[in-house]
Image (cartoon, rainbow, N blue to C red):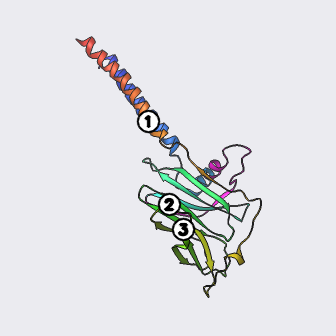
Amino acid sequence: MSKNRMVAIIIVLLTILSIYQLYNSEYNIRNNDSEIERAIMEFTTPFENSRGVENPVIIIKKEFEGNLLVFYSDKNIDELLGFTYLKKGINGKYQIRRTIYGPGNIAIEVYYFETSKNNYIAVGGSGYNIKISLYKLFGWKDELLAEGEVNGKDFLRIYEVSSETYPVIKVFDDTRTDITRELWNKYENIPGAGVGKAELFMLNVYIVIILIIGFIISKYFWKKDMSETW
């Protein structure tokens, strides 16, 4: 095999390796509690002095449409609750797409998210008052979106909804009396935010750029070999 063709093949291999390393740098979280918790911490505290979730601990994680939905709290802040959605890559690892966290005023929280298939709301509860036996989620004009009974245990449930919505949650005792205000806690100095990964499409852009550059250079050496042969 000629020198030029060898160079062309090497460039193709380097292009593939570069794409793999780039992709693997984005989708780099294994389905492992400690790795996910570390990723949540890094995602919510991108700067040294930023106030996010410094000691996240997973309460429940659930596989959903091939991806992961995680319901978590903070080891040092019992009143903090959050949700994180992780997208699975073709390498079998995950990338955090978005997270939301803040004070769990009744220790049962709701989270809206969407996938390529539909719109969903997730409800998670941990450490909530034993008086609560039922929750209801209400949308626009008090439309009942979902409801569910609870028994004092940690839970994470997902409901499909028809469109984007940010529901209000109310809780009831075993007599079906609304006790939301009675149990509501007005926590102060609890960090809270919604954080999303910006420019998700840029990974695909970078991959295409590397492919084009690799193709052009390898094609140049391959054609150069053919011209020299003739």
Look at 31% across and 20% down and name the residue there: 222
- Residue 86 in percent (x, y) is at 52, 54
Q: Nearer the viewer, mark 1 or mark 2?
A: 2
Look at 55% across and 51% down and name the residue there: 96
Q: Is residue 60 magenta?
A: yes
Kindly check if marks 1 and 2 are in contact, taking CB atoms under 8 A apart as contact.
no
Q: Earlier in the sequence, mark 1 or mark 2?
A: 2
**Foreground residue, 110 or 22?**
110
Q: Quote the CA–CA distance across marks 1 and 2.
A: 31 Å
Q: Amino acid at mark 2?
A: Glu
> Element at badge 1?
helix
Q: Nearer the viewer, mark 1 or mark 3?
A: 3
- Farthest residue, direction right: 188
> Considering the image in quadrants, where does the N terminus appear?
top left
Q: Quote the CA–CA distance across marks 2 and 3.
A: 11 Å
- Residue 22 in percent (x, y) is at 49, 37
Q: Is residue 209 magenta?
A: no
* Quadrant position of residue 171: bottom right
Residue at which label 2 appears: 164
Q: Amino acid at mark 1?
A: Ile
Q: Which residues are magenta?
A: 40-65
Q: Which mark is residue 207?
A: 1
- Residue 120 in percent (x, y) is at 49, 63
- Residue 184 higher or lower than 44, as above or below: below
Q: Earlier in the sequence, mark 2 or mark 3?
A: 3
Residue at which label 3 appears: 140
How crowded pointer 2 is (Cα within 10 Å; few <14, some 14-19, many 20+) is rated as: few
